[in-house]
Amino acid sequence: MDINVTLPGGKRVDAHVDGFVVRTDQPREHGGEGSAPEPFALFLASLGACAGIYVVGFCRARNIPTDGIRLVEHTESDPRTGRLVSVSIEVQVPATFPAEYRDAIARAAAACKIKKTLADPPQLTVTTAIVDAAAAVGAP
């Protein structure tokens, strides 16, 4: 999979993936326009959304309605460094949710691919390449 990232101006950054554009910006207090979530917020949202997909799959496999189910993600950052130190996801279910599946649905959410990737991170490399300016105008 390739994701093309463009810089449309200001502190906005757009990621083009599979025909979609994921727009990001920085908050006004960091010099942006606040026109879209900042990239780190999208990273955290993707973690919660990934867990949510696993919850949906768990429920569908057992014909359990998903009405009234939601996930609440809590994050904690180090006040000195701003670095993320913990993330917890709570799967909230209605009282009608089958009691025998309450622990299992949390395990299903925890099986999310993003969580597994964070537990065993991939190698990440960043390089620089010189490209023809005319070709870059047509990107992505």
Image (cartoon, rainbow, N blue to C red):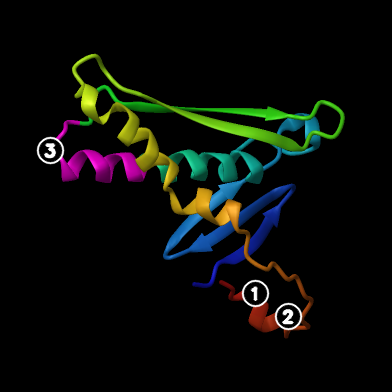
* Front: mark 1 or 3: 3
On the image, numbered disc 1 is attached to which residue?
Answer: 137
Expressed as whole percent of the image width and height from the top left, the position of residue 36 reads 59, 39
Q: Is residue 56 magenta?
A: yes
Instruction: Name which residue lies at 42% across and 47% down.
Output: 111
User: Which of the 4 image quarters holds residue 131?
Assistant: bottom right
**Of marks 2 and 3, which one's residue comes earlier in the chain?**
3
Residue pointed to by mark 2: 133
Q: Amino acid at mark 3?
A: Asn
SS at badge 2: helix
Could you tell me the amino acid type at mark 2?
A: Ala
Residue 110 placement, left or right of 34: left
The answer to the question of whether label 1 and label 2 lie on touching residues, with beta carbons closer than 8 A, is yes
Q: Residue at x 38, y 34 (%)?
A: 106
Q: Which residue is mark 3?
A: 63
Which residue is at the far right? 80
The amino acid type, in three-letter code, at marker 1 is Val
Direction from residue 23 to residue 52 in the image, left or right: left
The answer to whether residue 93 is visible is: yes
Q: Which residues are magenta?
A: 53-65
Image mark count? 3
Q: Secondary structure at mark 1?
A: helix
Majority secondary structure of magenta residues: helix
Q: Tell me where residue 38 sits by quadrant.
A: top right
Query: What percent of the width, then of the height, locates residue 16?
Result: 52, 62
Of badges 2 and 3, the one in the foreground is 3
| Residue 38 in view (yes/no) | no
Counting residues from the start of the chain, the first of labels 1 and 3 encountered is 3
